[in-house]
Image (tube, helix red, strand yellow):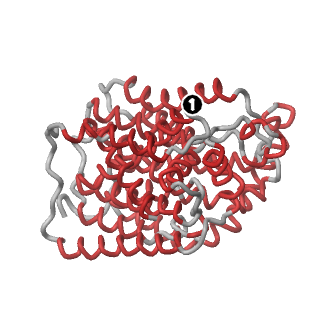
Amino acid sequence: MIAVVLALVATTLSGYALVRPLLRDVSRSERFAWSLVAGLLAQAVLLLVLIGFVSGADFAAPLALLTVILMTPLLLKRPGEQPTARGTRFLAAVRILLGAAAAGVVLFGLSALSEPMWTVDYLAIWGFKAKTIFLTGSVPDRLFHDPATAWSHPQYPLLLPLDLAALASWARRWDDRVLALLYPACHAATALAAFGFLARRGRLLGGAIVAALLGVFYPLYAAANVGMAEIPLALGFTLLSCALLDAFDADSSLVVGRLAVAALFCAAIKVEGSLFSGLAALTWLAQRPRGKPWLPVTASLLLPPATLALVMRLARGSVMSQTFDFSLLSPYRWGEWIARIGEAASSIVRIEIAAAALPLAALLGFFLLTRRRGSDRLLPLLAAQSLAYVAACSLCSYGAAWMAETSWARITCALFPVLSLSVGQRLGSTNA
């Protein structure tokens, strides 16, 4: 456990060294989240480099050495930074709320560490691939083309398995319980990113409320999701959304750079991340203020996922998914597809929406009774992503209702931190 904690600290510091030039205009809370994301991307790349040069070796020492080398820019003079937002009127309330958020993160951490990771998707996909990479010291071709393991979604990106394998390399052993430390780290980073962003926007109290909500949002931050991709993906969604809102208000290469980092992280975690980046680009094109250039932001959202997809295609070849039946998109099957969309939507309304009717009604009332804010630009993005998940359920080879009942709520929960940004910006007045 000590080795993995040190690995996460070194990962965050090396990530900060890499993206520090892009973080001059963000709060200290946000810097931790951006640093963790950049560090996780760097750890995956370093492990791939080591695999390419010394296949099957013990990577602990060279991985630690390369990570320390990445940290050397921290010895240089720090660039100028804007002061972190401060508040006075609600200082006691803010402290209490942040304490509640911290308590929620701690409780989730205890839950995550209470037993080895056990969820089905972890055993069949993420843990299977990570343990294979760690034990073989390679990324074997069978991860992508072995018919006996087609259920492991060979088309998925490898950032999460590579990061889990890198953490195991630091510890020199595979321990499903200790590796779960990655998840409370992502939980804390998500809450800090939302709080820091809203505080920087003059919503200190709103940011603290959102942090507390995220701290105890157990539909997402629960043992049942430890080992899967939704918790890191929620962190990526949050950072990309913060950078996108910054892009609406400022013309800065720093914002464009942060968007590119977040888009790459989202796409490297899961295919839903690429979808989110693409829809974010459409959101920007549809709502960008008049006179702002469209190309830099659009390119920063689309090029990283496209580049990653190209690299993966060249590295592993064509990989077919058995999860989805894309022949339903053929014109002669449109009638069947529409019926399956209705089946998926009906299942979601009867089971998921009905179970969450009270909080959803309260949320709707909150948005109806409060003033619109700039962060409401994210609402069409969230709606489009949720509807895309319904369409994905309708294409499932195992049945539209089956996927709607087993997956829709879980993957949609990863969007809640983004929704909370709109909630937080509607709370409190400037600097309150």
- Element under disc 1: helix
Circle 1 crowding by C-alpha within 10 Å: few under 14, some 14–19, many from 20? few
- Quadrant assignment, res 244: top left
The percent position of residue 407, horizontal first and vertical second, equals: 68, 58
Report whether residue 377 is seen. Answer: no
Relative placement, left or right, of 290 versus 166 is left
Relative placement, left or right, of 120 versus 116 is right
Q: Residue at x 21, y 56 (%)?
A: 202
Viewer-closest of 150 and 388: 150
- Compared to 264, does 343 lie above or below? below
The percent position of residue 62, horizontal first and vertical second, equals: 44, 40
Viewer-closest of 104 and 244: 104
**In which quadrant will I find the C terminus?**
bottom left
The percent position of residue 365, horizontal first and vertical second, equals: 44, 67
**Mark 1 lies on residue:** 52
Relative placement, left or right, of 247 versus 171 is left
- Compared to 80, does 229 lie above or below? below
Q: Residue at x 71, y 26 (%)?
A: 317
Viewer-closest of 412 and 382: 412
The percent position of residue 420, horizontal first and vertical second, equals: 41, 59
Callout count: 1
Viewer-closest of 317 and 189: 317
| Mark 1 residue type | Gly
Q: Residue at x 19, y 40 (%)?
A: 75
